[in-house]
């Protein structure tokens, strides 16, 4: 059982340390110790993408992410497990909860209208990513929460930056999407046919 102490490290360092350990060779088990919920979710999801069964144990303020039975080679990116299709893959990254500059109320209305209209892209909309204060669109009370949930229910992958959620103290208020890290976001950018940034 490989043990990794990733306490005190900010995203995406815990996932990168875990990936480096898996890249060294086939592991039947690994325990990664982290000290925040965002890192716990990111490491757990990464291990599961690599074929590990996971369980979480809490030790005071620390989380132990315990993975066993890995079967997917660590050198294979997580997104490669998805079936390849002929449909273009478009990733939309929202780094703000408003569109444009000037009047904030207008900017919020424009962003709400934009997100509600995104479904018109159909299956080409492959990833929707929220970073910086864009994560505020994924929490309770968001004007587009129901729209985002509907898109997610129909198969859209929504990624929400864990570091950003922690920075704004919003991790517990996130209501849609997967808490993620920069490694996942950069990998998604590489795999997308087109990236639209707001």
Image: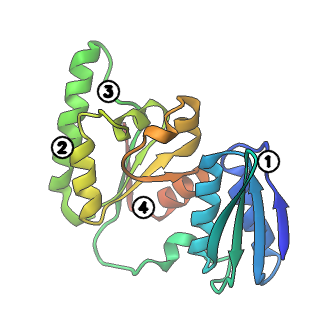
State the residue position of label 1. 7
Task: Tell me the crowding category of disc 4: few under 14, some 14 to 19, or many 20 or more residues within 10 angstroms, Cα based.
Answer: some
Residue in view at x 72 percent, y 66 percent: 19
| Marks 2/3: CA–CA distance | 14 Å
Residue in view at x 29 percent, y 66 percent: 155
Mark 3 against mark 1, which lies toward the viewer?
1
Which residue is at the front of the view, 81 or 195? 81
| Marks 4/1: CA–CA distance | 32 Å
Q: Measured along the vertical axis of the image, is residue 89 above or below residue 14?
A: below
| Marks 3/1: CA–CA distance | 34 Å
Residue in view at x 37 percent, y 56 percent: 194
State the residue position of label 2. 116
Left or right: 90, with 64 as reference point: left
First of labels 2, 4 by sequence position: 2
State the residue position of label 3. 98
Q: Position of residue 6 (x, y in %)?
A: 79, 52
Determine contact: label 2, label 1, CB under 8 Å: no
Q: Position of residue 148 (x, y in %)?
A: 27, 49
SS of the residue at dot 3?
Answer: loop
Considering the image in quadrants, where does the C terminus appear?
A: top left
First of labels 2, 1 by sequence position: 1
Q: Quadrant of residue 143?
A: top left
SS of the residue at dot 2?
Answer: helix
SS of the residue at dot 1?
Answer: loop
| Marks 3/4: CA–CA distance | 24 Å
State the residue position of label 4. 192
Q: Measured along the vertical axis of the image, is residue 134 above or below residue 149?
A: above
First of labels 2, 3 by sequence position: 3
Determine contact: label 2, label 4, CB under 8 Å: no
Q: Position of residue 88 (x, y in %)?
A: 30, 67
Mark 2 against mark 4, which lies toward the viewer?
2
């Amino acid at each position: 059982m490989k043990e990794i102490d990733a306490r005190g490290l900010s995203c995406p360092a815990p996932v990168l340390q875990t990936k480096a350990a898996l890249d060294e060779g086939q592991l039947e088990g690994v325990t990664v110790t982290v000290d925040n919920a965002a890192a716990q979710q990111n490491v757990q999801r990464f291990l599961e993408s690599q074929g590990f069964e996971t369980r979480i144990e809490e030790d005071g303020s620390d989380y132990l992410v315990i993975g066993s039975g890995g079967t997917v080679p660590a050198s294979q990116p997580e997104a490669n497990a998805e079936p390849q299709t002929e449909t273009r893959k478009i990733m939309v990254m929202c780094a703000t909860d408003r569109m444009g500059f000037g009047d904030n109320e207008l900017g919020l209305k424009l962003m709400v209208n934009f997100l509600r209209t995104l479904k018109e892209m159909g299956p080409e909309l492959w990833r929707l990513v929220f970073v910086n204060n864009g994560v505020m669109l994924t929490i309770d009370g968001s004007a587009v929460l129901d729209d985002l949930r509907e898109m997610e229910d129909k198969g859209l992958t929504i990624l929400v930056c864990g570091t950003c959620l922690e920075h704004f103290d919003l991790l517990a208020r996130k209501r849609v999407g997967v808490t993620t890290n920069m490694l996942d976001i950069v990998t998604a950018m590489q795999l997308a046919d087109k990236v639209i940034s707001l």
